Amino acid sequence: MNFALILFLLLLATGAIWIVDHFWLKKKRAADAKDPWWVEYGASFFPVILAVFLLRSFLVEPFKIPSGSMIPTLQVGDFILVNKYTYGIRLPVLNKKVVELGTPQRGDVMVFRYPENPSLDYIKRVVGIPGDKIAYQNKRLSINGKEIELRKTEDYLDKERLFYTPHYVETLGDVKHEILLDAEARSLIAPISQFPFRDNCHYNSSGVVCEVPAGHYFMMGDNRDNSQDSRFWGFVPDENIVGRAFFIWFNFGDLKRIGSFK
């Protein structure tokens, strides 16, 4: 469901009612006459819908985390906020960038439209930016020939399954973040799509090596062995970007998580 489009259509409808009533119908009604129900509801909802539309289109948009691909950084059920202007101002609904304010950086957690089905929103971490050579071989990540630093920490406990997973701190640029990495799991766990710029990637029994094309990004989940990401379905084009995730504002199952993400 394209909520942005629905919100835009509601904005047009209520806005039209408000304009017609304010500049035409209202002048024809008696001063003590009651507004028709459709005018009363339409005109009263218009400013509310306008405020919501502007807020989620240009400032911040809420999302709910539906899967465990970003564990331990983000948990299933986290409600997060996404900054809509960090990477530039885009036209609502069309998602066309009109003002350049910045570009995704390695380590950013980014929401984007899934390339294979743009009606779906995905969230992953930016690993590769345009021009980078990304190698994920034998579960070790390298960028432009430099292996990314990993520091082992205490094993992560999945409280629902009572299962422990090897837990590391990874450094991407200036960003330190946690990842889960099971040495016994297979490096590639799903069929590989025939995605655009597929020739930029080379697969073998150890993993994959990709060169990120211009205007695209290579995304990976922090739960490395349980994430469908750029290793399997390819690169994220700039026009699919929604924004940068930066804040957990609620989680029904764990109130301590509020504000725990930056």
Image (cartoon, rainbow, N blue to C red):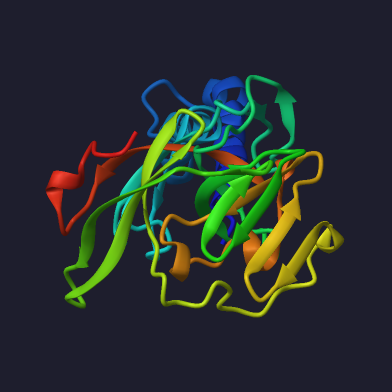
Residue at left offset 37%, top offset 42%: 177
Q: Is residue 30 left or right of residue 255?
A: right
Residue at left offset 80%, top offset 45%: 213
Q: Is residue 225 left or right of residue 163?
A: right
Q: What count of labels does the image hold? A: 0
| Location of residue 154 (image quadrant) | bottom left
Say whether residue 107 is visible: yes
User: Which residue occupies the foreground of this view, 184 or 98?
Assistant: 184
Q: Is residue 88 left or right of residue 148?
A: right
Q: Position of residue 3 (x, y in %)?
A: 54, 52
- In the image, residue 82 sits, relative to residue 22, either above or below, namely below
Residue at left offset 50%, top offset 52%: 123
Residue at left offset 66%, top offset 80%: 191
- In the image, residue 195 sits, relative to residue 14, either above or below, namely below
- In the image, residue 250 sits, relative to residue 25, either above or below, namely below
Q: Quadrant of the C terminus?
A: top left
| Location of residue 85 (image quadrant) | top right
Q: Position of residue 23 (x, y in %)?
A: 60, 20
Say whether residue 25 is visible: no
Q: Position of residue 22 (x, y in %)?
A: 55, 23
Q: Position of residue 199 (x, y in %)?
A: 86, 62
| Location of residue 7 (image quadrant) | top right
Q: Quadrant of the N terminus?
A: bottom right
User: Which residue occupies the foreground of this view, 5 or 252?
Assistant: 252
- In the image, residue 227 sits, relative to residue 254, either above or below, namely below
